[in-house]
Image (cartoon, rainbow, N blue to C red):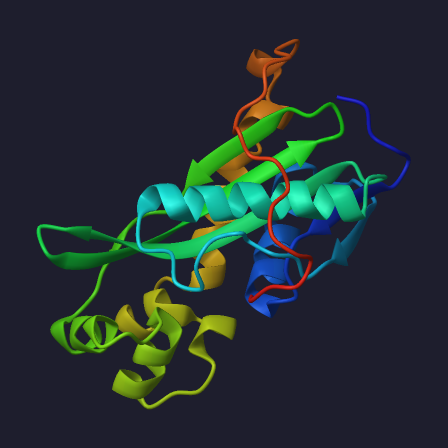
Amino acid sequence: MLVSAIMRIVISSHNPVKLAASKAAFAAVFPGTDMQFESLEVSSGVSEQPNSDEESRQGATNRVNNARRLQPDADFWVGLEGGLEWIEGEPIASAWMVVADASGQLGQARTTTLPLPPAVKDLLLQGLELGDANDQVFSTLHSKQAGGAFGLLTDGLMTRESVYSQALILALLPLSHPLWAGDTGTAGPSSPSGNDEGSE
């Protein structure tokens, strides 16, 4: 893996939680490395509230591809996409982390899953996005830019940032661990989709 003297990382969102999680993960995987982070707001190419595991993964992959198209001179591009899946009628929250390096190789990992309480489920069934449903149930504002559902439900024992950071460390394994050295395969079928403006 070849990188420039200063490792350049593009994060495909302006959301402060995603930025902080990315910075923590890269610092953990590449300690002592000089890094420069840049954030871009790009389209996920999926719905505002992904409602399947596959849609969430696709959204993260699309973010990476769109960020790379707009800023092609980085060393890494990061896409993070939270969403829902419904298992036996119950909503489960999780997020996908996708990272690409300059060679085109991808690393992917999913966060741990989070069961959601009935009050949140009722609002989701009414059409609210998860962040808005959490804000209403917990009487908060902009929780998806803070601890998120993870922080609210665990009283801060886990937060959206900590969970995303851990998953990003795992997503970076194929791009940093010697057991993957020499693997030239790429993952993810996506080409850039959507316009360059999107939600966080």
Tell me the residue at 27%/71% (across/down).
Answer: 153
Q: Nearer the viewer, residue 95 or 51?
A: 51
Is the residue 157 above or below the residue 55 in the image?
below
Q: Which residue is pictured at 43% across the width and 71% down the height?
A: 147
Residue 26 visible (yes or no): no
The part of the image, by quadrant, that contains residue 57 is: top left
- Which residue is at the far left? 88
Q: Position of residue 137 (x, y in %)?
A: 26, 84
Residue furthest toward the bottom?
Answer: 139
User: In the picture shown, does residue 7 fall above or below 84?
Assistant: above
**Image quadrant of residue 64?**
top right
Residue 78 spot, x, y in % from top left? 63, 45
Q: How many marks?
A: 0
Q: Residue 129 in the image: state x and y as whole percent.
A: 35, 72
Q: Residue at x 67, y 46 (%)?
A: 66
**Residue 28 screen position, x and y as percent:** 62, 43
Residue 70 in view here: yes
Depth check: give the residue in front, 85 or 4. Answer: 85
Whether 29 is drawn above or below 114: the answer is above
| Left or right: 73 as drawn, with respect to 62 | right
Q: For this view, does 192 lie left or right of residue 51?
A: right
Lateral position of residue 161 relative to residue 71, left or right: left
Most distant residue in the front direction: 194
Screen quadrant of the N terminus: top right
* Residue at screen point 88% across, 33% down: 4
Question: Which sits in the foreground, 112 or 11?
Answer: 11
On the rendered image, what quadrant is the C terminus found in? Answer: bottom right
Task: Name the residue at the top extreme.
Answer: 182
